[in-house]
Image (cartoon, rainbow, N blue to C red):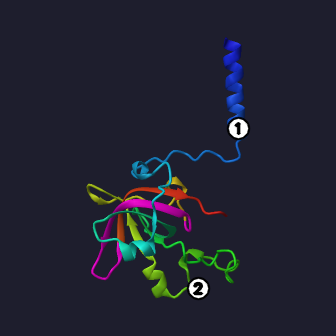
Amino acid sequence: MKQTLTIALAFALSALACSKEPAAPAPSGPLASFVASVAPTDAKSVLSARKESAAGAEVTLVGRAKDFVTGRAAFTLIDSSLRACSDEGDPMADSCETPWDYCCIDPQEVSEACATIEVRDALGLIKSDIKGVSGLDHLDTVFVSGALEKDAAGNLTVVARSFYVRKAAK
């Protein structure tokens, strides 16, 4: 019986050791409880939410991480339909040092395709970097579920209940 268990354990460990993708470490810290384990299937684009969703609505958005607020759990999500300077076929694909700034696109178009994502707790915006949580980095695809806020100027903010990161191909 011991020998069978030992052999089974050895096979299991060797299978884990030979897997092609390393297991992502479990998130920890003040943002860990906001990380979703699977991507939602009912996500809207940022541009669709801007047109179709009212303030106070519960939404799930999908887009790409653009900018991060240092020391805060906040970032900008941009509609996936916009091309970053590093996207295949872009004339600046090999020369742009900050492709997440979308410098090749009219700034007004970029602004209209963005939403601010904030992770808050009972005290307000969490004072912790969100960049790096669950591997989150510029241009990663992110699914965010939460309450939509709109200000008088039409700017969108989603107060996130959860988020899921799909890493960008490098």
Q: Can you see residue 130?
A: no
Question: Judging from the image, what secondary structure is the residue with disc 1 in?
Answer: helix
The mark tally for this picture is: 2
Question: Judging from the image, what secondary structure is the residue with disc 2 in?
Answer: loop
Amino acid at dot 2: Cys
Q: Which residues are magenta?
A: 138-156
Q: Residue at x 73, y 40 (%)?
A: 18
Q: Mark 1 = which residue?
A: 17
Q: Position of residue 65 (x, y in %)?
A: 51, 68
Q: Which numbered disc flags the more N-terminal residue, 1 or 2?
A: 1
Q: Is residue 81 above or below residue 36?
A: below
Q: Mark 2 = which residue?
A: 104
Q: Is residue 7 magenta?
A: no
Q: Identify which residue, 147 or 74, lies in the foreground.
A: 147
Q: Position of residue 115 (x, y in %)?
A: 41, 72
Quarter of the C terminus within the rendering: bottom right
Q: Identify which residue, 63 or 35, lies in the foreground.
A: 63
Quarter of the N terminus within the rendering: top right
Q: Is residue 14 above or below residue 117?
A: above
Q: Residue at x 51, y 53 (%)?
A: 134
Q: Identify which residue, 54 or 72, lies in the foreground.
A: 54
Q: Quadrant of residue 81?
A: bottom right
Q: Position of residue 139 (x, y in %)?
A: 56, 68
Q: Is residue 150 magenta?
A: yes
Q: Quadrant of residue 147?
A: bottom left
Amino acid at dot 1: Ala
Mark seen at residue 153: none
Q: Is residue 23 above or below residue 43?
A: above
Q: Residue at x 40, y 52 (%)?
A: 34
Q: Position of residue 55 (x, y in %)?
A: 29, 70
